[in-house]
Image (cartoon, rainbow, N blue to C red):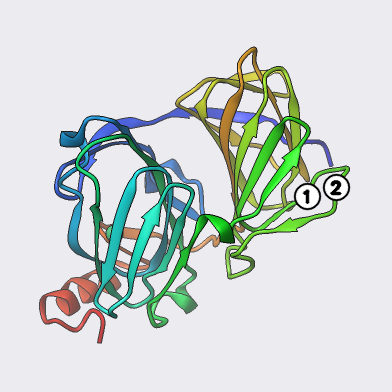
Amino acid sequence: MPARSVTQILTGRPTSDGGGVRLVRVITPESKLDPFLMLDEFDSDEPNDYIAGFPAHPHRGFETVTYMLDGHMLHEDHLGNRGDLVAGGVQWMTAGRGIIHSEMPQQVAGRMRGFQLWLNLPAKDKMQPAGYRDLDPDDIPRVRVGDSEVTVVAGCYQSATQSPVAGPIVGGATEPLYLDLAISADTALTAATPLGHTALVYVFEGSIEIEGQKVAQGSLGRLSDGASVTCKAGPTSARVLLLAGRPLREPVVSYGPFVMNTAAEIEQAIRDFRSGQLTA
Ligand code: FE
């Protein structure tokens, strides 16, 4: 099987969400990147862009993965979970049948930078009890590869030359791979990607080439199928999210914070939320 190449370039759209947090929406359900539903990038050193945070709001039917690069955010949910998200930390939240939570900045100045990914759940898991994992920076392996570094948030980093390194989250229906590649200038980095899984790269610093195709900063590259991908940084170092996951191939009906398989299930979620039964 050949290495993966770029089949499409997508760019994000500036928007705001929550209490009025400015962000760039890189993936939407319309992007058709099953099992990935949404990817938001937030990056600002202007407090007015983030200070309003994400006050209490519901979710049902999928998982949210928040990866902080800079800044400090407090997460609280209806189960009594409380997690302090600091730079390099990850919050992995499985909404299942329902969660009501808030995500609020704990800083009044300085840079706030990171990503929130929405990862779909299969029909059989959408109504499972809500779950939550708070991963400290120390829980997340960082693998040196020459002058480059791979942060393994989920799945397994496997190169041609080193033994595999598993992240703190492995398995699940979509078997997500979530790597943060810090690639030094003019250097190539290869990572294995499970055959048949949807895979994409999002370049958030510098630029890269994949099989000769350039992917610039702020661009997402959808990848063809293949057992691996090789990203080569340009004349400056690059940072890249490499995401892969098993496609669910199920109907997706989404309405704001609810993502289900049918319109009737969405109507039920709205009724449950209004009657206080979302999390019951
Ligand atoms: Fe949320």
The number of callouts visible is 2
Task: Check whether the beta carbons of the residues at disc 1 and disc 2 lie within 8 A of each other.
Answer: yes
Q: Horizontally, is 273 left or right of 171 in the view?
A: left
Q: Nearer the viewer, mark 1 or mark 2?
A: 2
Q: Amino acid at mark 2?
A: Gln
**For mark 2, does the 10 Å Cα neighbourhood hold few (<14), some (14 to 19), or many (20 or more) residues?**
few
Q: Quadrant of the C terminus?
A: bottom left
Ligand 1 rendered quadrant: bottom left
Q: Secondary structure at mark 1?
A: loop
* Above/below status of 224 relative to 171: above
Where is mark 2, residue-wise?
A: 162
Please give the label number shown on residue 92.
none
Percent across and percent down for residue 31 are 43, 41
Relative to the observer, which residue lies in front, 209 or 127? 209
Residue shown at 57%/58% (left/top)?
138
Image-quadrant location for residue 174: bottom right
Residue shown at 61%/22% (left/top)?
237
Q: Horizontally, is 223 left or right of 57 in the view?
A: right
Q: Horizontally, is 223 left or right of 67 in the view?
A: right
Residue shown at 59%/56% (left/top)?
140
Q: Secondary structure at mark 2?
A: loop
Q: Amino acid at mark 1?
A: Gln
Where is mark 1, residue-wise?
A: 158
Percent across and percent down for residue 201 are 57, 36
**For mark 1, does the 10 Å Cα neighbourhood hold few (<14), some (14 to 19), or many (20 or more) residues?**
some
The residue furthest left is 274
Percent across and percent down for residue 222 are 57, 35
Image-quadrant location for residue 224: top right
Percent across and percent down for residue 67 are 45, 50
